[in-house]
Amino acid sequence: MDMRSLAMGLAFAVMWSSAFTSARIIVASAPPVSALAFRFLLSGLLAVGVARLLGQSWRLTAPQWRATILFGICQNALYLGLNFVAMQTVEASLAAIIASTMPLLVALAGWLFMGEGLRPLSVLGLAAGVGGVALIMGARFGGGFDGFGVLLCVIGVVALTVATLSLRGATSGGNFLMVVGLQMLVGSAVLWPFAAVVEFGNFHLDWSLSLIVAFGYTTLVPGLAATLVWFFLVNRIGAVRAATFHFLNPFFGVAIAAALLGETLRIWDLLGVVIIALGILCVQMSKLSQSR
């Protein structure tokens, strides 16, 4: 792997992981569902506009439309929607740790529902991932986390797994950035009715510089730039090799939350993060060996 690919992979991991910290700042001052719906509206319009400037078309293939709608609902509306609501009471570091198990769940779902084989290294990785999560949750069980919020994060990462599996056929017809933009607009359209029912009757917004910066950052960086970097990285080194950078997400998610939000780093959290990261790496390295 060349230095440019390495830099792109590290940049993607940092941007993806930082989204939890910026989201935590946003939901402390704004209604979570409304804020996320507005963010997707802005990100989606930007992505579609850039895609049109690049000559991409919104005339997608039938598989692309199915994947776009499913991904927009499962990732943007369910996964991120549930995480935004949960992070009113759940620390950004814990939400990032739970979300970082997605590559493990994708491997497990591929084995259970798609007949994909699991090599011993993948089995070891899955076991390590489960053990790491159990270690973190066990250490916090005495009242260190909100159970309902954690449940929302868990349901969210399952939805993210479904979204990731649905994306497999979304880029075969080209127009990748257009697909991304339309997925965001689908997520926005799904979230607005929920925001109207749940939040508009009790709408409260505390304007501050930190809210404006966090909202602008999460719209442009994790929302748009990270997607573009991921696309170019996959084109450069392939999806399997690019996916190995996911093992860095638990580290960066915890570190960024501690640095910017002052969240406490427990020794069991750090140990669990290391175990989960090694599990993700094992699964991805097993996939890499299968692709050769």
Image: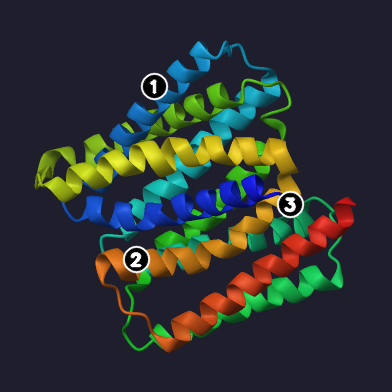
Residue 182's x, y, as percent?
49, 24
Q: Residue at x 31, y 84 (%)?
A: 143
Q: Amino acid at mark 1?
A: Leu
Residue 238 in view (yes/no): no
Q: Amino acid at mark 3?
A: Met
**Which badge, 1 or 3, comes first in the chain's sequence?**
3
SS under mark 1: helix
Q: Residue at x 33, y 58 (%)?
A: 21
Mark toward the viewer: 1 or 2: 2
Q: In terms of depth relative to the viewer, which is nearer, 220 or 168?
A: 220
Q: Is the residue 147 above or below the residue 209 in the image?
A: below
Q: In terms of depth relative to the viewer, which is nearer, 93 or 76?
A: 93
Crowd class of label 2 (few under 14; some 14 to 19; many from 20; radius 10 Å) = many
Q: Which residue is mark 3?
A: 1
Residue 187 in view (yes/no): yes
> Would you say the residues marked 1 and 2 are in contact, meaning their CB atoms lie under 8 Å apart?
no
Q: Which residue is mark 1?
A: 45
> Would you say the residues marked 1 and 3 are in contact, meaning their CB atoms lie under 8 Å apart?
no
